[in-house]
């Protein structure tokens, strides 16, 4: 637990022990690694602004940005150097995430379920940049290593109880203990419940983490268990500015009128996760150790999403000319009377289920031999997946935009997939001290993935499909110390094989609806990512840290979800090359009662090949240098803490984010029907200020208050161009001609001012 005389700090450059491979090993001093490492200790997660780990990473870690697409704090797209770790099925993933050596990217889509992570059990969170091959597939832009506490490292009882805006309630509890015989025990649990700051957006979750084991002689072992459950509401994007073709004018939409509103409801995600893992380590003296891992992991996810009915929109196309005074259709191909039209279903409930099981094992041998620090290892992961999509005709209440099921309407199976994968990885890495001031790090990993899937639709199951992907990935880096200055450079390659969801929806002639729908299985090529980093760092006796890095990552055959010319449907495809390049600057330190940190990130994310990008109803001709949507170019973060008295600490964060291109507006146009109409529909930049204060009544009791977005700034984190079928809260009526749905900029509204107060205890 942090006390008032111990200000929080983000450790970016200090010599800390990090995990050099997916499995725990002897560790390497971060000062000799050929890339910067950012590490958050647990106390920093609780002291900084944000309701959870994602919020803290957004305010404290350089290069990290969030797209709050779903509107729930636990369903957030996290980007680092432009690469995503997201819970959204269909998002292009590029960050590998490990929990005590267990890969938690789900096998079906490589998604990361932030709500299923035991945040109160974390001892540290480390973020490593670049296409580091040692961390295995999907490490295109970086790797995240989550390390949990034990009864040895965190003895005693800890609690954190808080209440905030939107009836947000959270309770975190933990207890750790050990004895002289080396036995240790730790458990941590979290409950979270809120009404949400947007309408009809309650959410709740709970998780429990337990670890026990023993350190005895040359042998260490532990067994850990994790269980989590959640029910979250993600109300998604809101329609904002729209363009009227007839008048040629722009008008404000629902977002401008009420950013707390919803477009359609419900949008419910229920998740569960259970994991059992065991680690065993044998020490061959002080310089060599062997670590083994076994785990099994089971997850399930069920979603329900209410939308306007596509059949009703088809009826609009057929009967767009409307009716005469007698109720007869004016359009020849319309065979529905006005009375029959009023009885049509106007909504649909789309639901999905996914069931995933994974088991795996790993072995890591790490040793210090003279001038060499060597780690060699192997991993094996297998998974099985079952996924299905259903739909049911429903009614849309236009007054509150809620979709209600028709009890008499059947629940129809649409499509699904079953299958699995086997993945083998063999790696080796060596950090060689050529001289006391010069270190060279070389790494090599072989990835071998076999994937099988059987797709099915309401017409029956398709034949079993089998695909294999193999790749040998190298990395080479060097550091050179010049007094307190350290120069470093690194080149690396990694790969990501297509997932079941991507292979199952890869035919533009048979698009699917995400996150629901699988239609065809043509082959996709694996993504190959090559990264380079060049930088300098400086440290002054743990009081001042400085880091500057230039980086570039090129993706070959990047896999993106391209929207087909039908609402909410699309397909996955390889899109040639994409590039993510930029610079990071970090400066931080402490002096007396003051602690501060400044982080700046420049990101230039672009397409680097010619092609066609499908976005909503738009076809965008990509060209080299065209910006990728949803990624701001500039991101500045500043944090300051002051120990005003031995008991009172005051602090705050400032975050400035530049504008980002909206999906569907990459070429400056908003409609294919009228290509001469141009508009910059980028989401504007924004500046947020967060303040906090804590008071330690005794060594065991601490009270705190936190205010996020102090000035209540209205801002949006993501934008997408689409047709608004509910302008002004009403479905497009048959009297509106087909194709006249207004092109609209949909945005992800950021949270308003949120106040949280709480108490922390440690005994």
Image (cartoon, rainbow, N blue to C red):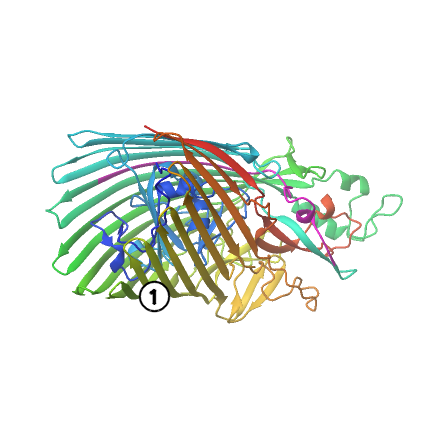
User: On the picture, is 658 further left or further right than 8?
Assistant: right
How many labels were placed on the picture? Answer: 1
Q: Which residue is mark 1?
A: 535
Give residue 249's position: percent from left, percent from top.
75, 60
User: On the picture, is 392 further left or further right than 73?
Assistant: right
**In the image, is residue 670 above or below residue 144?**
below
Asked if residue 141 can be seen in this view, the reply is no
Closer to the camera in the image, 206 or 31: 31
Asked if residue 213 can be seen in this view, the reply is yes
**In the image, is residue 543 above or below residue 751?**
below
Look at the image and give the residue range highlighted in magenta. Answer: 250-279
Picture quarter with the C terminus: top left
Picture quarter with the N terminus: top left
Closer to the camera in the image, 460 or 741: 741
Give residue 472's position: percent from left, percent from top.
29, 62
Closer to the camera in the image, 50 or 308: 50
Residue at 77 percent of width and 39 percent of height: 342
Q: Name the secondary structure under disc 1.
A: strand
Give residue 20's position: percent from left, percent from top.
26, 53
**In the image, is residue 497 above or below residue 388?**
below
Give residue 541's position: percent from left, percent from top.
27, 55
Q: Residue furthest left?
A: 285
Residue at 42 percent of width and 34 percent of height: 695
């Amino acid at each position: 637990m942090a006390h008032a005389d111990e200000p929080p700090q983000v450790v970016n450059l200090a010599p800390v022990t990090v995990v050099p491979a997916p499995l725990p090993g002897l560790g390497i001093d971060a000062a000799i690694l050929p890339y910067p490492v950012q590490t958050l200790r647990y106390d920093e997660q609780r002291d900084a602004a944000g309701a959870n780990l994602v919020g803290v990473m957004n305010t404290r870690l350089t290069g990290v940005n969030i797209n709050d697409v779903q509107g729930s704090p636990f369903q957030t797209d996290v980007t680092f150097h432009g690469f995503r770790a997201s819970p959204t099925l269909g998002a292009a993933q590029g960050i590998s995430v490990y929990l005590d050596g267990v890969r938690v990217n789900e096998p079906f889509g490589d998604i990361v379920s932030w709500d299923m992570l035991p945040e109160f059990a974390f001892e540290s969170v480390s973020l490593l940049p670049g296409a580091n091959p040692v961390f295995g597939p999907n490490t295109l832009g970086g790797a995240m290593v989550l390390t949990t506490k034990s009864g040895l490292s965190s003895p005693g009882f800890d609690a954190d109880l808080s209440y905030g805006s939107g009836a947000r309630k959270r309770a975190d509890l933990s207890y750790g203990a050990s004895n002289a015989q080396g036995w240790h025990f730790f458990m941590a649990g979290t409950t979270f419940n809120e009404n949400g700051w947007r309408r009809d957006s309650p959410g709740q979750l709970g998780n429990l983490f337990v670890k026990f084991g023993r350190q005895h002689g040359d042998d260490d072992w532990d067994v850990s268990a994790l269980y989590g459950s959640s029910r979250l509401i993600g109300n998604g994007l809101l329609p904002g500015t729209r363009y009227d073709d007839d008048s040629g004018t722009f008008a404000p939409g629902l977002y401008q009128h009420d950013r707390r509103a919803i477009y359609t409801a419900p949008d419910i995600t229920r998740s569960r996760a259970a994991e059992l893992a065991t680690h065993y380590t044998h020490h061959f003296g002080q310089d060599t150790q062997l670590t083994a891992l076994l785990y099994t992991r089971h997850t399930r996810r069920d979603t329900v999403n209410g939308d306007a009915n596509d059949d009703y929109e088809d009826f609009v196309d057929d009967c767009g000319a409307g009716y005469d005074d007698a109720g007869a259709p004016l359009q020849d191909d319309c065979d529905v009377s006005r009375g029959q039209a009023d009885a049509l279903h106007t909504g649909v409930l789309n639901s999905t289920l996914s069931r995933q099981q994974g088991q795996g094992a790993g072995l890591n041998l790490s040793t210090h031999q003279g001038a060499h620090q060597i780690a060699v290892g192997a991993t094996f992961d297998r998974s099985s997946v079952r996924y299905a999509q259903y739909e049911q005709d429903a009614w849309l209440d236009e007054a509150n935009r809620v979709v209600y099921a028709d009890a008499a309407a059947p629940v129809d199976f649409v499509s699904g997939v079953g299958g699995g994968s086997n993945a083998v990885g063999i790696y080796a890495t060596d950090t060689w001290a050529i001289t006391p001031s010069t270190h060279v790090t070389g790494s090599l990993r072989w990835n071998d993935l076999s994937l099988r899937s059987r797709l099915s639709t309401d017409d029956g199951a398709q034949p079993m499909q089998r695909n294999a992907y193999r790749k040998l990935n190298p990395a080479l880096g060097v550091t050179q110390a010049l007094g307190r200055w350290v120069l470093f450079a690194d080149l690396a390659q990694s790969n990501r094989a297509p997932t079941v969801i991507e292979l199952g929806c890869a035919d533009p002639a048979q698009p699917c609806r995400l996150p629901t729908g699988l239609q065809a299985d043509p082959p996709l090529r694996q993504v190959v990512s090559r990264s380079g980093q060049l930088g300098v760092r400086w440290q002054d006796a743990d009081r001042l840290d400085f880091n500057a890095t230039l980086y570039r990552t090129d993706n070959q055959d990047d896999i993106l979800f391209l929207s087909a010319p039908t609402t909410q449907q699309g397909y996955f495809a390889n899109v040639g090359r994409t590039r993510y390049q930029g610079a990071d600057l970090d400066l931080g330190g402490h002096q007396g009662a003051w602690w501060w940190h400044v982080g700046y990130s420049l990101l230039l994310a672009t397409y680097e090949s010619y092609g066609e990008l499908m976005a909503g109803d738009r076809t965008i001709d990509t060209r080299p240098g065209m910006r990728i949507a949803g990624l701001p170019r500039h991101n500045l973060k500043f944090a300051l803490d002051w120990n005003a008295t031995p008991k009172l600490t005051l602090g705050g964060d400032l975050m400035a984010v530049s504008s980002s291109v909206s999906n569907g507006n990459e070429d400056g146009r908003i409609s294919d029907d009228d290509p001469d109409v141009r508009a910059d529909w980028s989401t504007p930049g924004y500046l947020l200020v967060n303040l906090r204060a804590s008071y330690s009544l005794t060594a065991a009791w601490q009270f705190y208050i936190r205010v996020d977005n102090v000035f209540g700034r209205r801002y949006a984190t993501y934008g997408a161009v689409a047709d608004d079928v509910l302008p002004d809260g009403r479905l497009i009526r048959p009297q509106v001609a087909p194709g006249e749905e207004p092109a609209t900029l949909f945005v992800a509204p950021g949270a308003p001012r949120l106040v949280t107060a709480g108490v922390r205890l440690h005994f």
